[in-house]
Image (cartoon, rainbow, N blue to C red):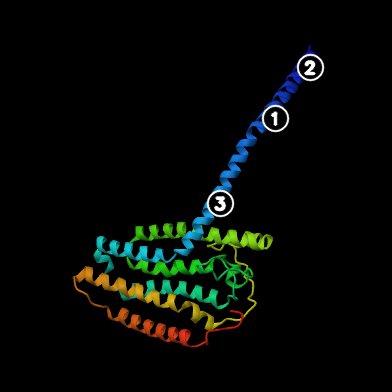
Amino acid sequence: MRLIRKFNALKKQQVIKVRISIIHIKLSFWNFPTFAAVILVFMALVHEFENSGNWLFKRRSWLPVILIAAGLVMMYLGNRQAIIFDLRDEMIFLGVSMLGEAIRIITVGFAPKNTSGRNTDAGQIADELNVTGVYSIVRHPLYVGNFFMWLGPVLFLRSAWFTVVFCLVYWLYYERIMFAEEQFLRRKFGEAYDKWSEKTGSFIPYSIKYIPLKISFSIRNVLKREYNSFVNIFVIFFLLDIFRNFYLSERIYFTRIWLILFIAAVVVWAIIRSIHKYTKWFEVEGR
């Protein structure tokens, strides 16, 4: 009886295995079109993300305008007592923006000509892949710098929820741009890019393995490329100060410290702009 029971049990196991195999074959056969459809949808999404990223990159100047407009509305509708002038706090906010500018200066100062750190409205440019210096810590240091540059004016509004909204909007906006850039770099540099991206965070560093730079810092390259970004910081804070004062007192006047900083920044901008326009002093070979 025991032998018969064992035989029947083995027989049932074999039948179950055969049925499972048949089901697996049927599922594999019928899921092939589904699998192909999923691949096609995925490729379409990748293509759409890249196209939207390129579109947003060409219109990236819209984001500051939208943020300024939203910030002014927020300042008008929000708690006006919270935006009363405070020198310490507002110098901290300015310091956050200058931190962002410093990150951009370090990135641009060591960037070779036509590298992944230099794109134009016409499209992506990359004669070589930046993997040293700040690019060995994050893949998009310029956008990290932009984030802090804009975070300063956002903090000026003293609104926690507006700060959170800004962070989300900034990430969604630049995520597409970064995706488009990385698709371009992946096609051009292939395995070299994949190896670099695997060990380097896109925006937030998750491992710090600094690779020494291959070239020297170029202050002339920084002045040529960053003088507009530099003056924009002070222009935006100056505008926020004007509107803040108007909302609080219903008259237009300038806080002295912001007026002095604004004038100084404009003078520096005018000098650098003139040198850039009328001389070739900023032309540096290989930059």
Q: Amino acid at mark 2?
A: Phe
Pointer 1: what residue?
A: 25
Give how far apart the Cα atoms at labels 2 and 3 are.
Answer: 55 Å
Q: Nearer the viewer, residue 113 or 101?
A: 113
Q: Quadrant of residue 283?
A: bottom right
**Residue 208 drawn above or below residue 281:** above
Q: Amino acid at mark 3?
A: Val
Measuring 67% from the left and 28% from the top, which residue is drawn there? 26
Quadrant where the image shows the N terminus = top right
- Classify mark 3: helix, strand or loop: helix
Would residue 136 be seen by someone viewing this image from the given angle?
yes
Q: Earlier in the sequence, mark 1 or mark 2?
A: 2
Q: Pointer 3: residues within 10 angstroms few (<14), some, or many (20+)?
A: some
Q: Pointer 2: residues within 10 angstroms few (<14), some, or many (20+)?
A: few
**Residue 239 drawn above or below residue 5:** below
Q: State the image coordinates of residue 24 (x, y, percent, origin top left).
A: 68, 30
Q: Earlier in the sequence, mark 1 or mark 3?
A: 1
- Classify mark 1: helix, strand or loop: helix
Tell me if label 2 and label 3 are in contact, CB under 8 Å: no
Pointer 3: what residue?
A: 46
Task: Specify the label residue 7 is tagged with.
Answer: 2
Measuring 70% from the left and 26% from the top, which residue is drawn there? 22
Give how far apart the Cα atoms at labels 1 and 3 are.
Answer: 31 Å
Q: Nearer the viewer, mark 1 or mark 3?
A: 3
Q: Earlier in the sequence, mark 2 or mark 3?
A: 2
**Residue 160 drawn above or below residue 224:** above
Q: State the image coordinates of residue 171 (x, y, percent, origin top left).
A: 46, 59
Would residue 213 appear left or right of 224 to someone viewing this image?
right
